[in-house]
Amino acid sequence: GQQLNQSPQSMFIQEGEDVSMNCTSSSIFNTWLWYKQDPGEGPVLLIALYKAGELTSNGRLTAQFGITRKDSFLNISASIPSDVGIYFCAGRAGNQFYFGTGTSLTVIP
Amino acid sequence: EAQVTQNPRYLITVTGKKLTVTCSQNMNHEYMSWYRQDPGLGLRQIYYSMNVEVTDKGDVPEGYKVSRKEKRNFPLILESPSPNQTSLYFCASSHGQQETQYFGPGTRLLVL
């Protein structure tokens, strides 16, 4: 299967700091997605990106679809305690979805 | 309320005993999918379905079967479970593969 490399694996930050995480792939994707998963629940979509170069914001979250279509990043500005969770990138190729290994975010008040 | 439901939420079974995990959605979605989540590996797609009677293999289909006889239901069948199928399973649905996927609450399976 296709490999998505997501980094960093985990982050510990102070409340109010900005966060950046990224995902790279060995293959081209048609769509890049960013999800957040809270403990004991399924992933919830944060941002969807459909075109190379696209930059999209959702509140304090900003994500970009890389020009090469093989990478994407997610930024969270001014982190708050409820940002805690695991963040996953995902790419769509055809009708299939491939997920990254996740970034565990801890926000210290 | 729009939702994806899965049953059971927790299941302990023994090797070789056939089991079915049900998934149902009330949003009239065409696309449905099953994933397994394992530590350090993220989510991996097992099977997906573009519509009724249309199913396709995902990245890790070995040891699993699915069916899509009705639009709202997409059960996951393990004919002969093995310990390496111990995992957290998620069902998801969307209007099309391009649209937002809604995930169910997950089914935690332990195969002894």
Image (cartoon, rainbow, N blue to C red):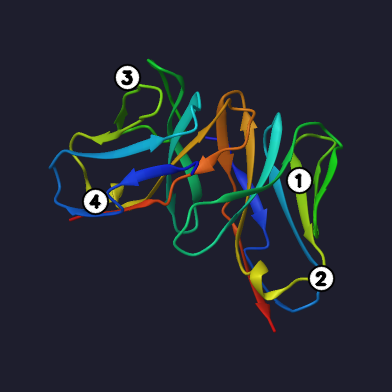
The residue that appears at 59% across and 27% down in the rendered structure is B97
Chain letter belonging to callout 2: A
Mark 1 or 4, closer to the camera: 1
Residue A38 shown left or right of residue B10 in the figure: right
List the residue tagged with mark 1: A72
The residue tagged 2 is: A78
Tell me, yes or no, if residue B19 can be seen here: yes
Residue ID for mark 3: B69
Q: Any mark on residue A82, and which? A: none
Secondary element under disc 3, as helix, strand or loop, is loop
Q: Mark 4 — residue?
A: B83
Which residue in the rendered view is the most extreme toward the front? B1
Q: Nearer the viewer, mark 1 or mark 2?
A: 2
Give the SS element for disc 4: helix
Q: Chain of mark 1?
A: A
Instruction: Tell me: residue B74, above or below residue A100.
Output: above
